[in-house]
Image (cartoon, rainbow, N blue to C red):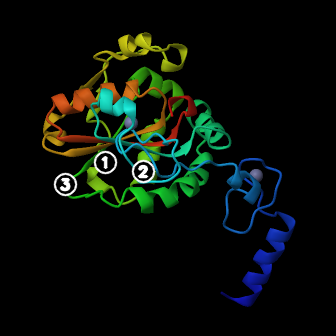
């Protein structure tokens, strides 16, 4: 780099230092989106995890294994993995992205997700696997201005290319938000709410289904059922966060 340019950039950084994208108070080192303090508050999910649903297991030693719940009643998907526990600061970033269409959160979320991509998605095969974001009903998509799951899918799978199926899975009903319901009502609310528009795109494929948060798992289970009915062979769930009560 030309020295005067380097000098000029140094001056700009002195006048406008990098602020933490979350707390907006602390300064960060060049190229880092979150300050060390906020970064230390992020709870990354680590083994031992349930080898199916991905919940953290209470015994701190030993390898991943099936949890009691998955042993009793195996989910329709084969594997669910989340990057972090659904807590601040990541929960705030996801909220800002989802409800305020704040796309400035995307590079910050990408920084949070990046280590997970290398560690947990290495078995993704772009030639044969397919990526499907959890869809929004068109009216809600129009109101929100973006589908957070699609934007997150692009972060999880930067090399996705044509294996990312933007509209193969659709929402057929404008259901009330799941956050307003619980238990059986969540299941009833989403029953037959999803359909596969292009079955030939998912038939015979392993699907990586992307959502922002795994709460009770009802949404991803309903999406999985529609994808399996259309001929998908296996469903792997990928989310940024997982709700702690559902551990
Ligand atoms: Zn901070
Ligand atoms: Zn489990």
Residue at screen point 46% across, 39% down = 55
Residue indicated by mark 1: 164
Label 2 SS: helix
Q: Where's residue 150, x and y in %? A: 42, 41
Given this view, does label 1 or label 3 mark the residue nearer the observer?
3
Residue indicated by mark 3: 128
- The disc, 1 or 3, on the residue closer to the chain's N-terminal end is 3
| Residue 196 in sight in this render | no
Label 3 SS: loop
Cα distance between the residues tagged 1 and 3: 11 Å
Residue 125's place in the image compared with 209, above or below, is below
Residue at screen point 51% across, 24% down = 143
Which label is found at residue 154? 2
Quick one: 15 or 148, which is closer to the camera? 148
Residue at screen point 47% across, 52% down = 47
Residue 158's place in the image compared with 23, above or below, is below
Quick one: 65 or 142, which is closer to the camera? 65
Q: Is mark 2 within 8 Å of ligand 1?
A: no
Quick one: 231 or 173, which is closer to the camera? 231
Farthest residue in the right direction?
A: 15
Cα distance between the residues tagged 3 and 2: 17 Å
Residue 244's place in the image compared with 18, above or below, is above
């Amino acid at each position: 780099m030309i020295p005067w340019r380097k000098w000029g950039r140094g001056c700009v950084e002195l006048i406008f230092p990098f602020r933490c994208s979350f707390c907006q108070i602390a300064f960060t080192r060049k190229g880092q989106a979150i300050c060390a303090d906020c970064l230390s508050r992020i709870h990354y999910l680590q083994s031992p995890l349930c080898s199916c649903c991905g919940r953290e297991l209470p015994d701190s030693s030993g390898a991943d294994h099936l949890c009691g719940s998955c042993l009793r009643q195996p989910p329709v998907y084969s594997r669910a993995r989340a990057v972090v526990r659904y807590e601040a600061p990541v929960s705030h970033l996801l909220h800002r992205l989802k409800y305020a269409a704040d796309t400035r959160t995307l590079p910050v979320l990408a920084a949070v997700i990046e280590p997970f991509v290398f560690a947990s998605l290495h078995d993704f095969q772009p030639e044969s696997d397919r990526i499907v974001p959890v869809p929004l009903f068109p009216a809600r998509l129009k109101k929100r201005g973006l589908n957070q799951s699609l934007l997150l899918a692009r972060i999880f799978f930067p090399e996705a290319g044509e294996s990312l199926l933007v509209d193969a899975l659709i929402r057929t009903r404008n259901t009330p938000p799941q956050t307003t319901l619980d238990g059986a009502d969540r299941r009833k609310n989403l029953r037959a709410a999803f359909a596969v528009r292009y079955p030939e795109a998912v038939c015979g494929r392993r699907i990586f289904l992307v959502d922002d948060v795994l709460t009770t798992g009802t949404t991803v289970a309903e999406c999985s059922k529609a994808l399996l009915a259309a001929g998908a062979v296996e469903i792997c769930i990928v989310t940024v966060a997982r709700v702690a009560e559902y551990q």
